[in-house]
């Protein structure tokens, strides 16, 4: 788990509210783990259909669309975080 970037206090947004956790962006994809254990969301780079980056109230949001049509909202980034690429 040494490669990639780790972001703390990132919320996984959805219809049922938000859950705080830790987001890891690495060469193989994206992994979010709920704070205190439990729920894990993992997307391999080949499963990612698209990403969006947008300003939301008091933070920034990374939106990730999977190949099967699901959309994940990761909220809580600072402005300094720009974008990343997945290496082949």
Image (tube, grey):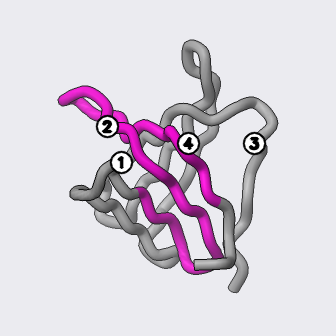
Q: What residue does disc 1 label? A: 35
Q: What residue does disc 2 label? A: 19
How far separated are the C-alphas under marks 4 and 2? 15 Å
- Quadrant placement of the N terminus: bottom right
**Placement of 48 over or under 81, stated as above or below:** below
Q: Nearer the viewer, mark 1 or mark 4?
A: 1
Q: What residue does disc 3 label? A: 81
Q: In the current view of this chain or complex, which residue is farthest to the top?
A: 57
How far separated are the C-alphas under marks 2 and 1? 8 Å
Kindly report the secondary structure that dominates the magenta region of the rendered protein: strand
How far separated are the C-alphas under marks 3 and 4? 10 Å
Q: Which residues are magenta?
A: 6-32
- Give the x, y percent position of residue 5: 67, 62
Mark with earlier residue (3, 4): 4
**Placement of 77 over or under 40, stated as above or below:** above
For the residues labelled 2 and 1, say whether their Cβ atoms are less than 8 Å apart.
yes
Q: What residue does disc 4 label? A: 62
Q: Nearer the viewer, mark 2 or mark 3?
A: 2
Q: Nearer the viewer, mark 2 or mark 1?
A: 1
For the residues labelled 3 and 4, say whether their Cβ atoms are less than 8 Å apart.
no
For the residues labelled 1 and 4, say whether their Cβ atoms are less than 8 Å apart.
no
């Amino acid at each position: 788990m040494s490669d990639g970037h780790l972001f703390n206090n990132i919320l996984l947004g959805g219809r049922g509210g938000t859950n705080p956790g830790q987001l890891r962006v690495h060469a193989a994809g994206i992994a979010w783990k709920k704070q205190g254990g439990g729920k894990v969301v993992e997307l391999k780079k080949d499963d990612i259909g698209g990403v969006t980056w947008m300003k939301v109230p008091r933070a920034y949001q990374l939106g990730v669309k999977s190949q099967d049509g699901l959309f994940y909202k990761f909220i809580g980034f600072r402005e300094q975080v720009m974008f990343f690429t997945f290496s082949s």
